[in-house]
């Protein structure tokens, strides 16, 4: 068995915003749904605050990751596995070259949900 051509990446990060689902037309005909979200990935855990990069994650209808999307919300810590690709671009804000990483997730795991403050019972 050869690993030639293997493209598998697993990343852990916090979801920047709720996933957005859209309908797309397939090149082979028909349509499908794809959910898109961005995650913030720490470069080196606990090295520095605010030292992270973003990865755009897409989840296609029918994948194991698709079934778990209902639990993914803004702030969720997820682990996403799939094929990664780079789309280099130049930043409009500071004219620096950026990697523009995109992950086509085949599976996601919910590490933790965002904390929701529960209402306190009224004391009499």
Image: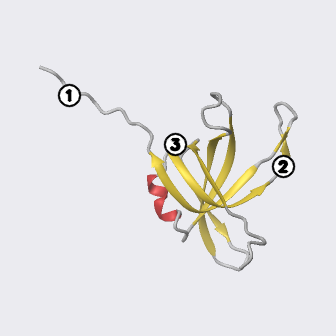
In the displayed structure, 108 sits above or below 12; it is below
Which sits in the foreground, 18 or 77? 77
Q: CA distance from mark 2 to mark 3?
A: 26 Å
Q: Which residue is mark 3?
A: 74
Single out the mark in the foreground, 2 or 1. Answer: 2
Q: CA distance from mark 3 to mark 1?
A: 27 Å
Q: Secondary structure at mark 3?
A: loop
In the displayed structure, 124 sits above or below 35; it is above
Label pair 3/1, CB-CB below 8 angstroms: no
Q: Which residue is mark 2?
A: 88
Q: Secondary structure at mark 2?
A: loop
Q: Name the image quarter holding the C terminus.
A: top left
In the displayed structure, 112 sits above or below 123; it is below
In the displayed structure, 45 sits above or below 24; it is above
At a point 63% along the width and 58% down the height, the residue shown is 58
Between disc 3 and disc 1, whose residue precedes?
3
Residue 20 in sight:
no
The image position of residue 82, as x and y in percent, is: 64, 62
At a point 60% along the width and 32% down the height, the residue shown is 46
At a point 64% along the width and 42% down the height, the residue shown is 41
Q: Which residue is mark 1?
A: 121
How many residues crowd around disc 2 within 10 Å: few (fewer than 14), some, or many (20 or more)?
Answer: few
How many residues crowd around disc 1 within 10 Å: few (fewer than 14), some, or many (20 or more)?
Answer: few
The image position of residue 115, as x and y in percent, is: 41, 36
């Amino acid at each position: 068995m050869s690993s030639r051509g293997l493209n598998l990446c697993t990343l852990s990060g916090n979801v920047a915003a709720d996933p957005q689902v859209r309908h797309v037309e397939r090149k082979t005909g028909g349509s499908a749904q794809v959910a898109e979200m961005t995650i913030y990935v720490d470069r080196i855990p606990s090295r520095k605050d605010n030292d992270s990069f973003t990865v755009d994650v897409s989840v296609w209808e029918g994948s194991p990751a698709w079934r778990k999307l209902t639990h993914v919300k803004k702030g969720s810590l997820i682990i996403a596995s799939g094929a990664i690709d780079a789309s280099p671009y130049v930043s409009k804000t500071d004219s620096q070259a950026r990697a523009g990483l995109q992950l086509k997730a085949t599976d996601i795991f919910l590490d933790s949900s965002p904390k929701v403050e529960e209402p306190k019972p009224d004391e009499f």
